[in-house]
Amino acid sequence: MLIFYNKADLNIYLNASRSNNSTIGFVPTMGALHEGHLSLLRESIKNNLQTVISIFVNPTQFNNPEDLAKYPRTLDNDVEKIKSISDKIIVYAPTVDDIYDGNTKSTHYNFDGLEHQMEGKFRQGHFDGVGTVVKRLFDIVKPTNAYFGEKDFQQLQIVKKLVEKEKIKVNIIGCTIFREQNGLAMSSRNERLTNLQREKAEIIYKTINKAKQLFGTKSAKEVIEFVTGQFKNDSLFELEYFEIADEATLLPCIRKSKNKKYRAFIAVFVNKIRLIDTISL
Ligand code: PAF
């Protein structure tokens, strides 16, 4: 399997294999791969002649230094998982300098307000960091199609906006959330949970599922009150936010409209480990 640690070598290889009808599928990740990532790789393999995965823990998208320091880094293990899918997948595992050329700073982006909602409110600068790294990765890999998980739905909308605003020629494909048996959305951060926390974290999916059910007959405000109540007396989980928002603008739902598609978004802390989830309503 080919593993590149710098963009120059990756580019020599990709440029040599690019032709008129070649297609490159790209799966950007921060490693600690799980079934969700592997499903993105499978989707890419199905639809492209070549598949590239990047494994890069991007420092500029972390607003919390402890979160960055503790983010799992498991390259050898990741490579084994990738191999189990196909040894033809190309791995790009750059250093910080290879991506940032000695200037580890984000570009400031205007994503038409998408960046000010939810994750943007609680993680200052996060989406500038995501936009910066995704733009750089797209410039390097020049993919035909790029695959992102819907767990980070706000990120998915922001990447679509980035592509539109920067006029990048790539199709962005959102893929459904992969869940553990108890419903917990798969995430690299789940690695940091104890067995008990992982088991109890089923409350997150159970609660948003119930919220989906309630949204059929209740107002957004009433559903938010229900969810807040579920976490109020829980000593293990701390609710950071629960919001019901318009899928397209990510603006909070004040009054339900038949013409809009809504989605619920949640962020919860389990002993400093931050978990997010989302469900279409
Ligand atoms: O979703 C992620 O893993 C990251 O935010 C991404 C898109 C790879 C950018 O670092």
Image: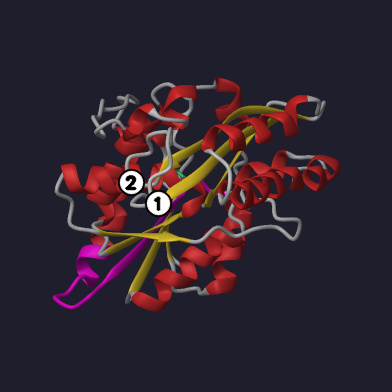
Residue that extends furthest to the front in the rendered view of this protein: 217
41 vs 189: above or below: below
**Magenta range:** 14-31
Displayed quadrant of residue 134: top left
Q: Judge whether residue 102 is colored magenta.
A: no
Image side of residue 247 versus residue 86, left or right: left
Whether residue 146 appears in this view of the structure is yes
Could you tell me how many numbered marks the image carries? 2
Residue that extends furthest to the right in the rendered view of this protein: 196
Displayed quadrant of residue 276: top right
Q: Amino acid at mark 1?
A: Lys
Image side of residue 144 versus residue 86, left or right: left
Q: Which residue is mark 1?
A: 261
Q: Earlier in the sequence, mark 1 or mark 2?
A: 2
Q: What secondary structure is marked by label 1?
A: loop
Q: Mark 1 or mark 2: which is in front? A: 1
In front of the other: 80 or 190: 190
Q: Residue at x 23, y 58 (%)?
A: 170
Image side of residue 52 versus residue 235, left or right: left
Q: CA distance from mark 1 to mark 2?
A: 8 Å
Q: What secondary structure is marked by label 2?
A: loop
Image side of residue 179 versus residue 279, left or right: right
In front of the other: 46 or 219: 219
Crowd around label 2: few <14 · some 14–19 · many ≥20 (10 Å): few
Q: Residue at x 75, y 48 (%)?
A: 202
Which mark is on residue 248? 2
Which mark is on residue 134? none
213 vs 246: above or below: below
Q: Are marks 1 and 2 in contact (CB under 8 Å)?
A: yes
Q: Residue at x 70, y 58 (%)?
A: 180
